[in-house]
Image (cartoon, grey):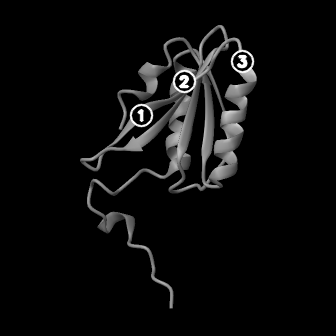
Amino acid sequence: MTETPPDRASLPMSEARLPVKLEVSGLLRLTESAGGFGMVLKKGETDVGTILVVLLNNQSVGSVFERMPQLDGSRCWTLAKQQDADNASEFELYLQRRAAQDPDLWIVELTIADGERLILNQS
């Protein structure tokens, strides 16, 4: 017999999450409304998948941010990987490895100046 997952509304506020597909859609719209460009590089599980945000600046140098769980139960965006301008292939390999490790993973690329401001104030 399989257990049914709890209804989202019955979860404590610290466990209730916006479905990932809506969060990704919001990130893309926020980026575009700020004059940038965003696209989904990999789609994962629509409700509870993990999101990697690849921020590219105007020189196409990237940073990867991932929201990591904290000791208090909250989740904060954390810099997971910084691209070395002299070794772009290593950055791409990192993204490929992460995608292969987690089939639920979303990878979202945002090209915008000072893109950190779009995600670091969210939790």
Disc 3 crowd, CA 10 A, few/some/many (<14, 14-19, 20+):
few
Quadrant of residue 64 in the image?
Answer: top right
Where is residue 76 shown, x and y percent of the image?
36, 37
Q: Nearer the viewer, mark 3 or mark 1?
A: 3
Res 111 → quadrant = top right
Secondary element type, mark 3:
loop
Q: As displayed, is residue 53 above or below residue 98?
A: above
Task: Compute the Cα span from label 3 to label 1.
Answer: 24 Å
Kind of residue at badge 1 = Trp
Helix, strand or loop at mark 1: strand
Looking at the image, residue 108 sits to the left or right of residue 30; the answer is right
> Which residue is denoted by mark 3 in the rendering?
87
Camera-side mark, 2 or 3:
3
Counting other residues with Cα less than 10 Å from the Cα at mark 2, is it few (<14), some (14-19), or many (20 or more)?
Answer: many
78 to 16, vertically: above or below: above
The residue depicted at 35 percent of the width and 27 percent of the height is 121
In the rendered image, which residue does mark 2 sit on? 31
Amino acid on which disc 3 is placed? Asn
- CB atoms at circles 3 and 1 under 8 Å apart? no
**C-alpha distance separating marks 2 and 3:** 27 Å
At a point 70% along the width and 27% down the height, the residue shown is 90
Q: Which mark is residue 77?
A: 1
